[in-house]
Image (spheres, rainbow, N blue to C red):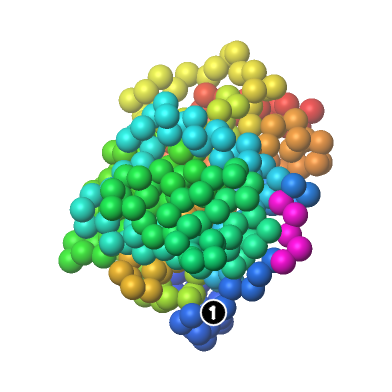
Amino acid sequence: MTEFVNQRRSSSFKAALRSSPGLETAPASQSIQPLANFDWTRQEPLNPRPFKPVYHITMGVRVVDPADLILVDKSYLANIQLRQQILSKHGTTVHGAIPSGDAAVRELYAYLLQDYLPSRYPSMFRLSSDGKTFQNLVTAKAFPAMAPPDVTSALRILAETIEDDWFVLQETPEGHRSVAFVCCFASGFDPSTKLGKGLKEIHAPVPSYEKIGPSMERFFSKLEVGKSVKRHNWAIQTHPEICDVKGHLTEEDDTSEQSNVDIEQTHFRTELQSLTRLPQTKAILFSFKTYLTPLSGIREEGLGPQLADAIEGLKTGNAPGMWTYKGSIRWAPRVCEYLRS
């Protein structure tokens, strides 16, 4: 699973809670404000730039309006079509559930197709007059508003309806466990290998995770219904593919510098990640929307030197193993030279 850790924005998880007043006072349920005149074809992607000079492994969350659970922009249709191709190619590598996740999948399905999407984006989605059919006005597809008996079918429908990838986590006596997922835009990992595993096992490859693991479990346990939080994650990839089910580097891999890095194929990748508590099953929805920007675009924005500093900052801070984990040890010299040129 994409790691829910980031650069330092607060000294602890308690500080993150204290610095977000709405996290303690927001009502358990909030109405979904419709974007009545929303034109997805004109909406520019968010394209966040969350990099900092020094990398610290922490959560870095901020409270958000639950109405902003799903963000849509002009890349929607292209991304949905790409997700359909990825589902056909990778199958159960990019979606799946174990029996203990069935109820949460059905709850998520009903919320998105019956309530959230038709209410938030009425120009894109609607329910039939009898409320039994969900209609996607962009793709011209129709699906049952209630989750089909086969959970795998429900997962595929969700994957073809929203761009966000997600994992559902259920709390157990041993900690939070991944019980269902849709992850078409994997970033250097095989999402199917995370199914059924706890947070500690999921994050085993992440350098210095032990520094925040127990605190993250407590944060997840305390997250309340109606009090969603978001944060960003970023990486560099030396290819244009948004789906990469290969693993991150380890110290045992070949970590020699690459002399043939193709800058034109290299991209800045960022994820807008969310944590949301489902009200009925009490499961946690960890969802994330992925954005890719060619490295040339970062330089054109005038942010090349700042990103170069952030890349080199991966080997400083409190998690120096990120330098290898994120692959920087291979491509950083060439990429940083380009960004500063």
- Asked if residue 256 can be seen in this view, the reply is yes
* Number of other residues with Cα within 10 Å of mark 1, as a class: few under 14, some 14 to 19, many 20 or more: few
Residue 145 location, quadrant? bottom left
Residue 333 drawn at (x, y percent): 62, 25
Q: Is residue 37 magenta?
A: yes
Q: Is mark 1 on a helix, strand or loop?
A: loop
Name the residue type under label 1. Answer: Gln
Q: Could you tell me which quadrant the N terminus lies in?
A: top left
Instruction: Please give the name of the residue rendered at 40% of the width and 19% of the height, measured from the top-left corner.
Output: 254
Residue 277 location, quadrant? bottom left
Residue 233 drawn at (x, y percent): 54, 49
Total labels drawn: 1
Q: In this view, does 104 lie above or below 237?
A: below
Instruction: Please give the name of the residue rendered at 46% of the width and 31% of the height, measured from the top-left corner.
Output: 86
Q: Nearer the viewer, residue 155 or 242?
A: 155
Q: Which of 84 and 301 is in front in this view?
A: 84
Q: Does the magenta stretch include residue 170?
A: no
Residue found at the very far top of the displayed protein? 260
Instruction: Please give the name of the residue rendered at 38% of the width and 47% of the height, measured from the top-left corner.
Output: 155
- The residue segment tinted magenta is 36-40
Instruction: Name the residue beneath numbered marker 1.
Output: 30
